[in-house]
Image (cartoon, helix red, strand yellow):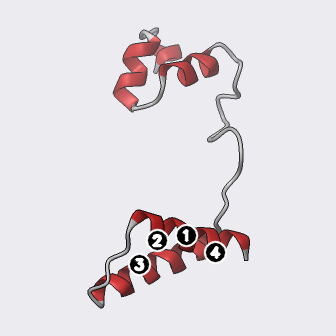
Amino acid sequence: MVMETCAPVKTAARQYGVRHNTLRDRVNGRLDSQTVMAGQGQLLSTEEKAKLVDHVKYMANLGNGSTITEVVAKATDYAVF
């Protein structure tokens, strides 16, 4: 949008919910515009994510909802082992 319509970076960033610094870096060529994410890759595979979601849903159906801390601990278990 920014490059095609010359829209201001801050306006486009706000419209699409991205940080304006990130968008500016992509427009100026400091980040590859085709790269989806920078930094560390995914820690969990799609299968591991599905297992985690199933576990959280299962526990919720039993009446034992999980806290964020518990979900993060379970995700860490999947990522480490």
Callout in the foreground (1, 3): 1
Determine contact: label 1, label 3, CB under 8 Å.
Answer: no
- Disc 2 crowd rating (10 Å Cα; few below 14, some 14-19, many 20+) is few
- Count of numbered marks: 4
Tag 3, which secondary structure? Answer: helix
Find disc 4 in the rendering and name its residue. Answer: 77
Q: Give the residue drawn at x 39%, y 32%.
A: 17
Amino acid bearing label 2: Glu
Q: Is residue 81 above or below residue 6?
A: below
Amino acid bearing label 3: Val
Question: How far apart in space, not on screen, are marks 2 and 1 (Cα)?
Answer: 5 Å
Find disc 2 in the rendering and name its residue. Answer: 70
Determine contact: label 2, label 1, CB under 8 Å.
Answer: yes
- What percent of the width, then of the height, locates residue 58? 38, 87
Lower sequence index among marks 3 and 2: 3
Tag 4, which secondary structure? Answer: helix
Tag 2, which secondary structure? Answer: helix
Determine contact: label 4, label 1, CB under 8 Å.
Answer: yes
Front residue of 74/58: it is 74
Question: How far apart in space, not on screen, are marks 1 and 3 (Cα)?
Answer: 12 Å
Q: Residue furthest bottom?
A: 62
Front residue of 28/45: it is 45
Q: Give the residue drawn at x 30%, y 91%.
A: 62
Q: Which mark is residue 5?
A: none
Q: Which mark is residue 73?
A: 1
Lower sequence index among marks 2 and 4: 2
Amino acid bearing label 4: Asp
Lower sequence index among marks 4 and 3: 3
Question: How far apart in space, not on screen, are marks 3 and 2 (Cα)?
Answer: 10 Å
Find disc 3 in the rendering and name its residue. Answer: 56
Q: Give the residue drawn at x 48%, y 26%.
A: 19
Question: How far apart in space, not on screen, are marks 4 and 3 (Cα)?
Answer: 14 Å
